[in-house]
Image (cartoon, grey):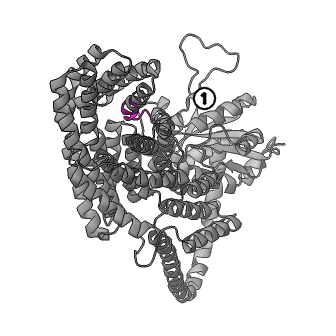
Amino acid sequence: MNQYFAFLSYSHVDSESARWLHKALETYRLPRALRALPGAESLPERMAPVFLDRADLSTSTELAAEVQRALDQSSNLIVLCSPAAVKSRWVNEEIRRFRELGREGRIFCVVVGDVDTDGPGDFFPPALSEARPGERPAGNERRPEPLAADLRPSADGRRDGFLKLAAGLIGVRFDQLRQREQARRHRRLMVITATSVAASVVLMGLTLFALIARREAEVQRSIAEQRSLTAERTTAFLKSIFEVSDPSEARGNSITAREVLDRGARQIDEGLKREPSVRAALTTTLGTVYASLGLYRQADEILAKASRLAGVEPAVAAKTAIALGELRTLQGAYPEANQQFGKADEAMSTLDSAVDIDRARGLIAWGESLASTDDFAAAREKIAAGIDAARRSRPPAIELISRGLEAQGLTARLAGDLPAAEAHYREALTMRIAESGQTHPKVAETLNSLGAVEYLRGNRTQAAEYFQQALRIDRQVLGPSHPDLAGDLNNLARVYLEQRKFSEARTQLLTARDLMLAEKDATHDDMAFVFSNLALADVGLGNDAEAAPLFAAAWIAAEKHRHRLRGPILIDMADLDCRQGRHSEAEPRLMTAARLLAEDYPDEPWRLAWLGLVHATCRLSAGDVPAAKTDLAKNLAVILHRWPDDTLYGLSALRRALAIHEAAADRADISTYTRRVAAASAGNSR
């Protein structure tokens, strides 16, 4: 004998109807008059138990084992048919599984919903009409739609629809069951009428008691609401003290903070095992705090643990997915980040209680990840939707609106629209300072972004000022070991490189490298900047042997992410090859670099000109002086128009020109470029 009288299959969109039907089935008792009929002795007194699947299977790849066992142990399958059920993978999988058991004749359909549609095909899952195993359908014809009880007000309604279903389940005619049910209802009405007079007397005595009880209930509800609000505020506060540290009281990753976090992680693991949603919510908050402190590896471990918890409410699971997606973005794992954000958005879109602030955070973070992979159209769409959701929340979520503006700035900057990027960043900076003051870490982040805009415009002095402001704030607030400092240091070091301050740049970059590698993989996309800049510093200091493996590491990180630095890195690697006599390796690198530069830097002609100058130097080292002079003549003016003589690229171009003219014995040009090299070299170097 099977364990369950019936299995209730439904889309989670129809959860309310499923819960109502489940309760109606399990509490319904067949009329005694019906069971007393000849031959009706085998009819059950009750239609229970009924299996109601409450698990959220939206992120699974197959039916859960307990669901399969319940299907196997169910005598009947009740399918709630609706437009949502038609699209539900799991409803269709449950139907197929039940049909495979050979119980197709015990499948009962119930139509639910609030409005009618154009036809029955809008409600019945396709698995109901699929051909049986071994059956060959005639042409393109589908099997006829099954008969169904219809709970909608415009059809059978809930009362008659339920009785139709019950009649089918127990194998009697609908009119038989309805007549006996009406008779039973009539008898109940008579009993109710007879007792109503006595009840009215008792009611007067209970009124005073009810008023007192109601007052007590209101007091208890108020206490419960206050406790809930206190818990929410406590969680938000604990999170905020790590995200927005007071410079006079906190130093980022301090031993005290780590002790608190680690103890909290242990307590969550040891307790709350019977409350998976609470455990997941607290674990997610803890993982977010670890990430805000720059402890990405610990955050990864904790958030991954939260994502694996079973029986978690969809809203909580969505928050965990967003936090994990944000962490994956910080780690440079953009495809995995996008997958987590998509999972969270899908879950929240099915929840009537989805909070705008949570959806806003997920959409903006998704946009940031998409922008980092140059999917600018999709990034703009997600960010705009996120900002709109943040504005709808009450009160408007200023922090998220600011973050959305910064994400719009990032998208515009990566797409090459520097005026739009600057406008978004400045608007975000104004909001940040008004909301959180001058020393918020996010203020430093926005200053860095403005510095990047000025750097791309060629305003390196202004860029350096922004980078230095950001570095001062991050050191003050986050302490000396936070990985966010690595970005500040790398940006400032790049300006030093172009000013030919190679020693200063190398010192900054070594610290940046160590900070990043403590929490990120060597193939993180940001490591392409750090490794390549560190290699250039070594080249400037004459350390070619140390530069070579750094260029190789930069190339691996850039190639993994199809980074825009691939072309420039290949040029630098080819330049090093030529200086060391490896011309056969340099030529294919330069050919590949030319293709990449055309794709990634169509509006920066100086980059192709730089490739031409490196090619000229390679030809010179191979002994082909005429070809070197030809390349020099085509490209030197473009470089010197873009870069002043005393900069990294300007002085290097002059030195290459001097070497080529010396090889060609061009006395007048030798004299000209000797003077220019001497004058440029008198500036900052090493």
The quarter of the displayed image where residue 644 is located: top left
Amino acid type indicated by mark 1: Leu
Q: Mark 1 points at which residue?
A: 128
Vertical relation: 338 (above or below) 364: above
| Front-most of residues 407 and 192 | 407
Q: What element carries label 1?
A: helix
At 18% from the left and 37% from the top, the residue drawn is: 676
At 64% from the left and 13% from the top, the residue drawn is: 136
Packing grade of label 1 (10 A; few <14, some 14-19, many >=20) is: many
Please provide percent x and percent y for residue 209. 56, 88
Please provide percent x and percent y for residue 17. 54, 50
- Residue 106 lies left or right of residue 429; in this view the side is right
- Residue 386 lies left or right of residue 337; in this view the side is left
347 is within the stretch colored magenta: no
At 52% from the left and 47% from the top, the residue drawn is: 14
How many dots with numbers? 1
What's the magenta region?
561-569
Vertical relation: 130 (above or below) 368: above
